[in-house]
Amino acid sequence: MYQFSLSSYLQVFNLSLREARKDTILENRLRNIIDKLTINVYDYTCLGVFEVHKLMFSFQMTINILDGEGEIDKKELDFFLKGNTSLEDVDEPCPANWISIAGWKDIQTLVESSDIFKTFKEDLKSNINLFK
């Protein structure tokens, strides 16, 4: 993979300073610079990344941006990335044969771990055909 030098990144930073929309209000100007720099870093990094890796890079960059803004629930992200990692069996039988055992375990954990999804299991059971 192509290795970028520090001077290359400084060029991207300077380009972002020049291209960012001007504003007399400092907070707006800084936001414009950050937005432009984010786009330029993404574009510049994608030059050295294989096409198949660009989606993963986009996901990682998005997660880092949202985390920096305090918009990520670490527990939900951990569940999204790993699923249910326990070795325990679930108490309740799966209501549909098209849901895998691992998927049903994930649903059980999701319902227990997040208030946002607390009714998901009941919604799934009462609308099984809709979910299919």
Image (spheres, rainbow, N blue to C red):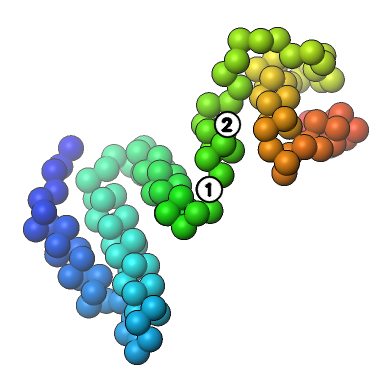
Tell which circle, 2 or 1, labels the residue nearer the N-terminal end: 1
Q: Is residue 82 left or right of residue 93?
A: left
Q: Secondary structure at mark 2?
A: helix
Q: Residue at x 42, y 54 (%)?
A: 68
Q: Residue at x 14, y 48 (%)?
A: 4
Which residue carries the number 2 mark? Answer: 79
Q: Residue at x 14, y 64 (%)?
A: 11
Q: Are marks 2 and 1 in contact (CB under 8 Å)?
A: no
Which of the image's four quarters has the N terminus? top left
Q: Is residue 82 visible?
A: yes
Tell me the amino acid under the disc marked 2.
Phe
Numbered label attached to residue 82: none
Q: Quadrant of residue 95?
A: top right
Residue 107 locus on image (x, y percent): 71, 27
Q: Is residue 125 above or below residue 115?
A: above
Instruction: Work out which residue is located at the far bottom of the displayed protein and give it.
Output: 24
Which residue carries the number 1 mark? Answer: 72
Q: Is residue 56 above or below residue 41?
A: above
